Amino acid sequence: MNENIIKFISQQTCATVSCVDATNKPYSFSCFYAFNEKEGLLYYKSSLETKHSQIILEHPFVAGTILPDKLNKIRIRGLQFEGEVLPVTHPDAKNAADIYYHTHPLAMAIGGEVWTIKVNSIKYTDSSLGFGKKVGWRREVKELV
């Protein structure tokens, strides 16, 4: 993953995530996240009873955005991502709670589950790299032999 993308995601705290229900109606929610740069994973916390959690349990593919915590109208930065929310039993979700609570320790006092988004692609925009400059990243797909 590009170092500019890693730095940007690591410096922010909140994402907007969108999912689509069985009737193709979109639904979005905002969440605090933690980032596992080595594995390209985002972690967030939410209750199983929320509308978005119920949708994601049935349709785990999501898309989202991360904007700077402090917006600057002169320096345009932000990213769009696509990914899949992993089941809690997935090996990549094993350390989700530890990593999330390390970043957000006060969240331990709030009910809910820590969820894992396996990010599959990113488009990052940063005008400080050049007007309209975009940097992309796509997860490598390993072929089964």
Image: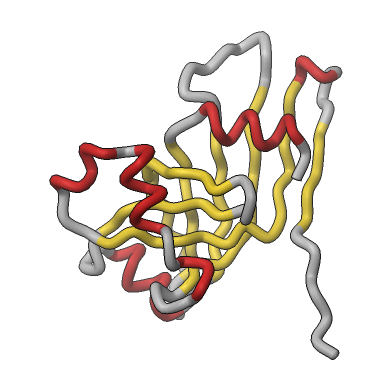
> What residue sits 60% from the left and 12% below the top?
73
Depth check: 17 or 90 in front? Answer: 90
Depth check: 60 or 100 in front? Answer: 100
Q: Is residue 39 left or right of residue 131?
A: left
Q: Is residue 130 left or right of residue 99?
A: right
Look at the picture and state if 62 lies above or below 56: above
- The image quadrant of residue 21 is bottom left
Render colour scheme: secondary structure
Residue 106 in percent (x, y) is at 21, 37
Residue 130 in percent (x, y) is at 85, 18
Q: How many marks?
A: 0
Q: Quadrant of the C terminus?
A: bottom right
- The image quadrant of residue 76 is top right
> What residue sits 23% from the left and 43% below the top?
107
Q: Quadrant of the N terminus?
A: top right
Look at the picture and state if 96 lies above or below 88: above
Look at the picture and state if 138 lies above or below 10: below
Residue 11 in percent (x, y) is at 53, 27
Q: Is residue 125 left or right of residue 25?
A: right
> What residue sits 49% from the left and 56% below the top?
18
Residue 13 in percent (x, y) is at 44, 33
Look at the picture and state if 93 lies above or below 6: below
Depth check: 17 or 40 in front? Answer: 40
Residue furthest toward the top? 74
> What residue sits 78% from the left and 49% below the top?
137
